[in-house]
Image: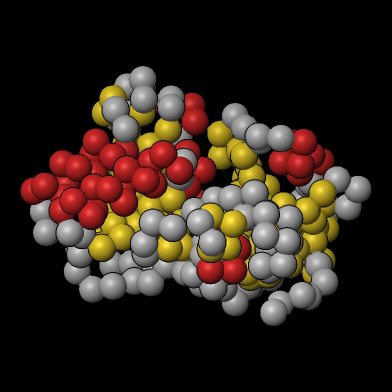
């Protein structure tokens, strides 16, 4: 069991991704696999799990949804130190042969970005979704892929949900595996679609975590711990 103390790292660059989201590029490489996460600690505030955007150099992306994320985005600047534990998680994305579809909703494109670095662009489609255009993330980062953009209100790309686009793809193309990360309602729909069409899938789940190492049990889902058994699952837990 990994119980290492938080390690200090220096933030070299802060990238504004959209009106509420920033990426923090650090000064070291992390030996991590796509799908793993880190526990980031901001002294005096809290420690929370964050997906890994990139491992070389270590990069994580923060979207403001609460006190902790707002504190990071408003206070951490280039040259500052931040602390983390990890990489954590035993369930990781595994690249398989054949045609693949990567589906991200909202901040789900963070681990999807890390995964995409390890996938052949010619055999991969990426579906990016958000409620509105201003909430979309990483469109430029995926410009070399065959990318489909979906927004709930139709302000960018096609109007509808990521699963609408996925359904069209798996009905007309022979897909080997679907990878997904995003809201749980989206992930459950992906699982149902893939089960219906007999397509394999790998989904990165989110959950409330206190320890990140399988001790506290706060991230339990039907007897499995997202931090220890996941966060990537190939069967709906």
Residue at 11% over, 59% down: 174
Outermost residue to the left: 172
Residue at 78% over, 75% down: 4
Outermost residue to the bottom: 1
Residue at 59% over, 68% down: 228
**Residue 55 appearing in the image:** no
Q: In this view, does 1 lie to the left or right of 169?
A: right
In the depicted view, which residue is nearer to us: 179 or 142?
179
Image position, residue 143 (x, y; %)? 34, 48
Residue at 15% over, 53% down: 197
**Residue 31 appearing in the image:** yes
Which image quarter is the N terminus in? bottom right
In the depicted view, which residue is nearer to us: 106 or 120?
106
Q: Is residue 148 left or right of residue 140?
A: left
Image position, residue 217 (x, y; %)? 67, 60
Q: Which corner quadrant of the image does residue 164 belong to?
A: top left
In this rendering, is residue 189 above or below 223?
above
Colour convention? secondary structure
Q: In this view, does 120 lie to the left or right of 68?
A: left
Which image quarter is the C terminus in? bottom left
Outermost residue to the front: 223
Image position, residue 71 (x, y; %)? 79, 39
In the depicted view, which residue is nearer to us: 15 or 126?
126
Image position, residue 166 (x, y; %)? 24, 44
The mark tally for this picture is 0
């Amino acid at each position: 069991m990994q119980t290492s103390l938080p390690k200090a790292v220096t933030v070299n660059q802060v990238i504004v991704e959209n009106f509420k989201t920033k990426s923090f590029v650090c000064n070291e490489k992390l030996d991590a696999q796509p799908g793993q996460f880190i526990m980031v600690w901001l002294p005096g505030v809290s420690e929370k799990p964050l997906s890994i955007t990139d491992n070389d150099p270590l990069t994580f992306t923060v979207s403001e949804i609460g006190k902790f994320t707002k504190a990071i985005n408003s206070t951490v600047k280039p040259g500052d130190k931040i602390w983390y534990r990890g990489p954590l998680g035993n369930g990781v994305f595994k690249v398989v042969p054949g045609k693949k579809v990567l589906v991200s909703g909202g901040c789900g494109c963070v681990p999807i970005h890390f995964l995409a670095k390890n996938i052949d662009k010619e055999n991969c489609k990426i579906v990016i979704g958000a409620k509105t255009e201003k909430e979309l993330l990483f469109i430029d980062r995926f410009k070399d892929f065959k990318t489909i953009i979906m927004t709930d209100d139709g302000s960018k790309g096609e109007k509808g949900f990521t699963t609408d686009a996925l359904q069209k793809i798996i009905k007309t193309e022979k897909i080997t595996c679907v990878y997904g990360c995003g809201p749980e309602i989206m992930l459950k729909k992906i699982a149902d679609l893939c089960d219906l069409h007999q397509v394999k899938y790998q989904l990165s789940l989110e959950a409330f975590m206190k320890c990140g190492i399988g001790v506290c049990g706060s991230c339990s889902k039907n007897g499995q711990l997202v931090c220890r058994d996941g966060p990537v699952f190939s069967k709906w837990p």
